Image (cartoon, helix red, strand yellow):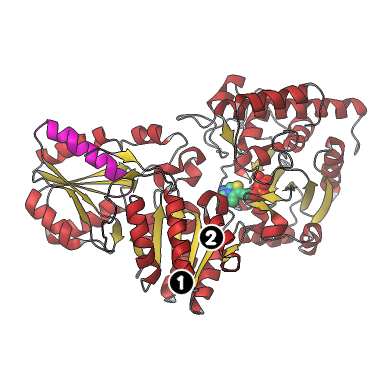
Amino acid sequence: MKLTLDSRAMKDVYIETLIKLAEEDQRIVVLDADLMHSNSTIRFMETYPGRAINVGVQEANMIGTAAGLAATGKIPFTHTFSCFNTRRALDQIYMSVAYAKLNVKVVGTDPGITAAYNGGTHMPLEDMGVVRGIPTMTVIEPVDNVMMEALVKDIAYLDGPVYLRVNRKEPVQIYAPGTEFEIGKGKVLTEGDDLTLIASGIMVAESLKAAELLEQKGIRARVVNIFTVKPIDKELIVKCAQETGAIVTCENHNVINGLGSAVAEVLAENCPVPMERVGVQDLFGEVGSVDYLQKRFAMTAEDIAAKAEKCLARK
Amino acid sequence: MNQLQVADRERLEAFAREIRITTLKELGHLGFGHLGGAMSIVELLAVLYGEVMKIDPQNPQWEERDWLVLSKGHAGPALYATLALKGYFPMETLFTLNQGGTKLPSHADRNLTPGVDMTTGSLGQGFSTGLGVALGHRLDGRDNYVYIILGDGECQEGQIWEGVLFGGNAGLDNLVVFVDYNKQQLDGYIDEINPLGDLRAKWEQFGWHAQEVDGHDVAEIYAAIQAAKAAKGKSSVIILNTVKGKGCHFAEGVKLNHHMRFTQEQIAEAIERLEGGRQN
Ligand SMILES: Cc1ncc(C[n+]2csc(CCOP(=O)(O)OP(=O)(O)O)c2C)c(N)n1
C-alpha cells in the first residue's frame, strides 16, 4: 500500500463539509474560543456570520453556552484545541451537556503529539480517556479527509453528544474516495491471520508501515482502523482476536484510558488473547517536532513491529 | 524613591532593547512563534529583572527571591531571553527553543528552565497559582514579592475573575499583578471578540489597588510598582497599555500577529532597525 499525504488540511475539509451542511440546516451553529484562525472556523463565520460565535478565551463558558443553544434546538459544534475542549471544560461537558442530555458536538484539534511545538501543556494524551468515561458520549477520531467528509453529517445528526478528535494538518490518505463509514464500526484495512494491529488517528499509517515491516519477516498482520473509540466495535475486535489470536493497539494517546484500554476491556470480557499497547506510556507530553515525539514516545512503525513480535511470542 | 533617575531609566531602556533583540534572535532561529505577545511585555521584563526583583541568577531557587508567574505562558521566549541576559543559563541555550529535549519549551515550565518559577500555558491558571504563592509566602511570614503577568485575552477566562474576587478579598500586599493590555488576542482585536470594558474600574470594584500606565515606558512601570508596594493591605494590579508586536516592524500594527512565521531576512531587518535606534 502506497501512503501519500493529502494536500488538504483536515481542518479545512472539516469546515468545508460543515459549511455545506449548514447551508441546508439552519440549526447548525459554530462556537470557538479564540482559535478561529487556527481551526479554520473563521471560514464558517465568514459564510454565516450570524451562526458563528467567537466567545474569546473561555472554554467552560463556551461549552455551557453550547448546551443552552442545544436546549433551544440548535446543533452546536464547539472548537478549540483538544486539551482545552475536554479537560478545561470537563465538568461542563459532563453535567451541562451529557447528563442534561443536550446535543453538543465537541471538536478538539491538535490531539496528542500533533500539538508538537505547543508542548506538554497543550498535548492532550488523556482527552479520549476523560470523555470516554462519560455516559452517552460518542468518541470519534477520523483518520483522513475521505472519512472526515463522510462523517460530519452523521455526527451532526447523531442524537447525543460527540467528541470529535481532529488532526488539523494534512493527513496521510488511507481510504479511497467514496468509501462509506458507519459510526461504531471499524474497518479492516489489510488482511492477515498472525495478529491484528488495531489503530486510530495518525497511528493508522504507522500500523500499515509496520505491517509491511512484519511481512518482510513472514508475519502477516491484519490492520484494523477503529475510528469510533466509543461505542467500540466489539464484534470486530472479538472476531480479530478469535481469528488472529493476538492484538496490538496503536494510538496517539496515553495507553491508559484510550483505544488500548477500550480494546482491552472488550478482550478481557469476551476473548482474552495476548495484547500489547503502543502509545504514550503514561507520560506527559513534551515540546518538539512530530517526528521527534514519535520516536521519543516509541510510536513509530518500527516500535509497532517490535511490540507485535513481542505479542506474537506470547501467543 | 518612586521615580527612576535618568541614568537608571536609560539603563532600563537599553536593557529592554537588548531583551527585544535577543527574543527576536531566539524566535528567528526557529522561524516561527508567539511573537506579538512576547514583544509587548519587554519593557515590563526589563523593569522587573533590571531593577525591581530580588533575584540571584546563580541560585534560581534562592528562598529569599521574588517570584514571577508568567500566566500568559506563551510569551515564554521573551522571559527566556531576559533570563539568559541575566545569566541564568548560557545564551546559546536560547537557540534550542522548542527543539526536542530542550529546557526552553514554547510555554513556561518551572521544572525545565532555571529561573522560571511556575508552569503555565493553559490561560487563566497562572493567576491562581500566583495567588497561592503569595498566600504561601504570607503564611510563612516572608517578604518575597510575587509578580504575575496576565494577557488581556486571558482575562476572558472565568478563572481570572474567580481570582480577582478571591485576591481582592485576600488583600495580598506582597503581590503585584500586571495585565498586558495590548488590545489583541489570537483571533484579532479584543473589542471585536469579547471586550473587557473598563478593566481598571472592574478590578477596583473587586477591591484591588488598580493603576493604568504606559506599558512601554520603563519609568511609568517602575513608579507604578513602587505605588503598588506602598498600598498596604491591598492586592495590586497594574494595567499596562501596550502594543502587541511592539518594536518589531513587521508585527506591530498587524491584526494577526499572535503566532507568526518569519524569514531570517525579516528578523535581521527588525534587529538592524532596533540597533539603529528606531522604535520599530
Ligand atoms: C485555556 C487556554 N485556551 C486557549 C489557549 C490558546 N491561546 C494561547 S494564547 C491565546 C490568546 C491569548 O491572548 P492574550 O491573553 O491577549 O495574549 P497576548 O495577546 O498578550 O499574547 C490563546 C487563545 C490557551 N493557551 N489556553
Identity of the residue drawn at 71% across and 40% down: B144
Amino acid carrying mark 1 in the image: Glu
The residue at which mark 1 appears reads as A24
**Residue numbers of the magenta segment:** A200-218
**Position of the C terminus of chain A by quadrant:** top left
Amino acid carrying mark 2 in the image: Phe
Q: Where residue A2 sits in the image (x, y, percent)?
A: 24, 38
Tell me if residue A211 is in the magenta stretch.
yes
**What secondary structure predominates along the stretch shown in magenta?**
helix
Identify the secondary structure beneath mark 2. Answer: helix
Are discs 1 and 2 less than 8 Å apart at CB?
Answer: no
Question: For mark 1, does the 10 Å Cα neighbourhood hold few (<14), some (14 to 19), or many (20 or more) residues?
Answer: few
Instruction: Report the side of B207 relative to A130 (left or right).
Output: right
Identity of the residue drawn at 77% across and 22% down: B275
Instruction: Report the side of A281 relative to A88 (left or right).
Output: left
Quick check: do tags 1 and 2 share a chain? Answer: yes
Tell me if residue A217 is in the magenta stretch.
yes
Rendered view: A18 above or below A25? above
Identity of the residue drawn at 43% across and 49% down: A124
Q: Where residue B193 sits in the image (x, y, percent)?
A: 66, 59
The residue at which mark 2 appears reads as A44
Instruction: Report the side of B72 relative to B229 (left or right).
Output: left
